[in-house]
Image (tube, helix red, strand yellow):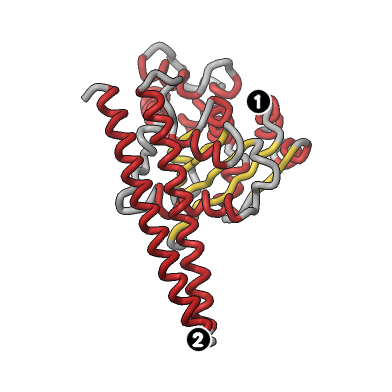
Amino acid sequence: MTSGEGSVDQALMAWRRAASARTRAARAEEAAARHEILAATTGREIHQDMAAALHATAGCHRSSAKLQEAFARRMTGWEQGDGPRPRFMSGVAEACGTSSAALTLVDGRQRQLAVAASDAPARAAQDLEFMLSEGPTKDATQCRNLVFASHQAIEARWPCYGPALTALGIHEVAAVPLDSSGRCLGALAVFDPRPGLVGTRTFTEIVEALARTVLLDPDADPELYGGTDHRDVVQQAAGMLSVHVGCPVEDALALIKARAYSGAESLEALAGKIVAGDLKIAPGESP
């Protein structure tokens, strides 16, 4: 399959998923209307609660449809020669009124497993969290609550991450956990979002759409149309360094992170050199 054929398939898949989400939203609204009628005729509170829950579900599906449609439009435009290859997270960022947003997936110990970013600043911000082990995404997944900081509060809250983030030109960040069935999948981080967005129903629906349908729906694509990076090169480099230096993989990973943070190269570039054999680290060498 050529890249062109693949992008056409991705656009068609996104349109199909969007249509499915629209249909499910309509069904949820119809069910909500029935419960509202029952609430009015019987006076039972359970029907009011069901109607509210179904309205929320409908909003989640509508938000999912909008995100899929945004990606499909971008992919179609790219096929016609319009700009760089689109990322699914660019539509998420746009829905949040910004250009920078990142989705991070974590394991049961809140360790970062994968990341999908809308642009270079968002990716750099997530790399900083990965290297420094502090930041809004980490806090959001640990406390299972919204994390919000702006301006001086960013540097005060995260002594290492904060100054590095503001150095990227970012002045406000919000991170919210992606919860599903009692477990935390990860978090959505939004950088310099539209004023007043955080805490609104729109923001909640975007988060719910990501957690409930975009990532976990039976027809979902957790890879976000190829936009998710599982940090395979970094993990491979950590394994190779572990063998070469004779230390646990976690210690080797910490050394790679320290090297990347203290140097001019990105985490992936440094890991790529280790995997390619272009960089040797001697046993006992400090970062």
Residue sitting at x 34%, y 52%? 20
Callouts 1 and 2 close, C-beta under 8 Å? no
Horizontal relation, residue 226 to residue 284: left or right = left
Q: Which mark is residue 168?
A: 1
Residue sitting at x 53%, y 77%? 48
Q: CA distance from mark 1 to mark 2?
A: 57 Å
- Is residue 29 at all visible to an observer of this figure? yes
Q: Residue furthest top?
A: 278
Percent across and percent down for residue 43 are: 54, 87
- Up/down of 189 relative to 87, above or below: below
Residue sitting at x 27%, y 33%? 9
Amino acid at dot 1: Leu
Q: Secondary structure at mark 1?
A: loop
Q: Secondary structure at mark 2?
A: helix
Q: Residues within 10 Å of mark 2 (few under 14, many from 20)?
A: few
Q: Quadrant of the N terminus?
A: top left
Horizontal relation, residue 158 to residue 226: left or right = right
Residue in the foreground of this view, choosing between 22 and 210: 22
Amino acid at dot 2: Thr
Q: Residue furthest left?
A: 1
Q: Quadrant of the C terminus?
A: top right
Horizontal relation, residue 33 to residue 201: left or right = left
Q: Which residue is mark 2?
A: 41
Q: State the image quarter where residue 249 is shown.
A: top left
Residue in the foreground of this view, choosing between 260 and 287: 260
Residue sitting at x 31%, y 44%? 16
- Up/down of 107 relative to 165, above or below: below
Percent across and percent down for residue 33 are: 46, 71
Percent across and percent down for residue 193 are: 64, 39
Percent across and percent down for residue 166 are: 70, 29
Q: State the image quarter where residue 25 is shown.
A: bottom left
If you read the primary sequence from the N terminus, does the residue marked by circle 1 or circle 2 appear first? 2
